[in-house]
Amino acid sequence: MYFWQMKQVQINYWWQAMRPKTLAASIMPVILACALTIHAGKFQAIPAAICLVFAILVQIVSNFLNDYYDFIKGSDRSDRLGPERAVAKGWISPSKMLRASILLILVACILGSALIYYAGWQMIFVGIAVCLGAFAYSSGPYPLAYHGLGDICVVVFYGIVPVGFTYYVQSLDWTIATTIAGVSIGIVATNILVANNFRDRKEDKISNKNTSIVLLGEQFGIWFYLSNGIIAVLLTTFFYCLQMPLAAILPPLYLIAHIRTWKKMRKIYQGKDLNSILEESAKNTIFFGLLLSIGILLS
């Protein structure tokens, strides 16, 4: 019984390290791409499923590595406001976290290699770029998250790349609609990171983790969060020109939830209570993605 309880505790530690509440950032772009392929009559279930699992695995790896390297670099301080980190709390040793990251990235690569059958050998370079992005975010000689480039990474690797290439492996095509959808969902997903960085701005500054909010200030963070949602919705208006009117009509409903969360963020402003903004931002990403997907499917 004791052994089983200990196993359950360990599983829970790994589950928390995966940051399941943020996985919407990798799931919604694939769902959105599938809505586009269904609309175009080019949907293929197997490559779509492979893309979904690959995207989730890569995000988990990115979360594991962020946990590991923030501990190694001393960014996870004792006064941390965010959810507990597995390595910093001693739940998972640094070596185990690194090994798990490497193992999962290998599994993702092996799984992703099946996409070569559907879209050709060039998918090897896409896979390499995605894997390097996962490592470069927190590690290497120029960790992107420490130099104000995390927001751009999210737009690229949780927007343009997953939407574009999930569509491509099913259709062997890349359209204007694909690009608009990828950029818009990427911008919305960026607010998950913005909420995280806004909460940790003071601790990040002390730790020399120069996020965009540390570099540009608190007020930038507040208005950046609001403008991301507005810009994403404005981008979807282009679907009118692409004969997908409902894909332009439904996304503005997202602004109801977005502005409500933004007002709450301004009111709380600092402290652990900002963790609720992180969770709401993830839920809002799902809401936006579903509105846009439904609009595409019904157009």
Image (cartoon, rainbow, N blue to C red):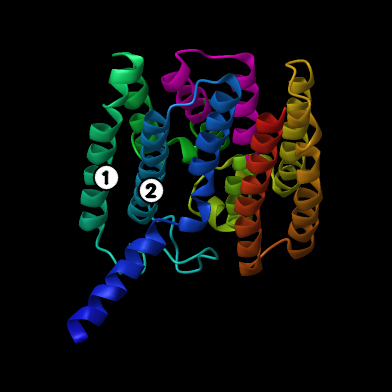
**The N terminus, quarter of image:** bottom left
Residue 13 lies, in percent from the top left, at 34, 67
**Horizontal placement of 159 versus 188: left or right?**
left
Helix or strand or loop: what does disc 2 sit on? helix
Which residue corresponds to the image point at 53% horizontal and 31% vertical from the top-left? 34
**Horizontal placement of 189 versus 69: left or right?**
right
Which residue corresponds to the image point at 45% horizontal and 67% vertical from the top-left? 84
**The C terminus, quarter of image:** top right
Cα–Cα span, label 1 and label 2? 8 Å
Residue 172 lies, in percent from the top left, at 45, 13
Q: Nearer the viewer, residue 159 or 73?
A: 159
The image quadrant of residue 5 is bottom left
Residue 47 lies, in percent from the top left, at 38, 29
The image quadrant of residue 14 is bottom left
* Label pair 1/2, CB-CB below 8 angstroms: yes
Query: Which segment did they paint magenta?
Result: 161-188
Q: Which amino acid type is shown beneath numbered disc 1?
A: Leu
Q: Verify whether residue 173 appears in magenta.
A: yes
Q: Which amino acid type is shown beneath numbered disc 2?
A: Ile
Residue 30 lies, in percent from the top left, at 50, 35
In the picture of the structure, the residue carrying the numbered disc 1 is 104
Q: Nearer the viewer, residue 35 or 285?
A: 35
Q: Nearer the viewer, residue 225 or 181?
A: 181
Residue 216 seen in render = yes
Q: Verify whether residue 85 appears in magenta.
A: no
Residue 60 is labelled as 2
Which residue corresponds to the image point at 50% horizontal and 46% vertical from the top-left? 209
Helix or strand or loop: what does disc 1 sit on? helix
Q: Reply above or below: 136 against 260.
A: above
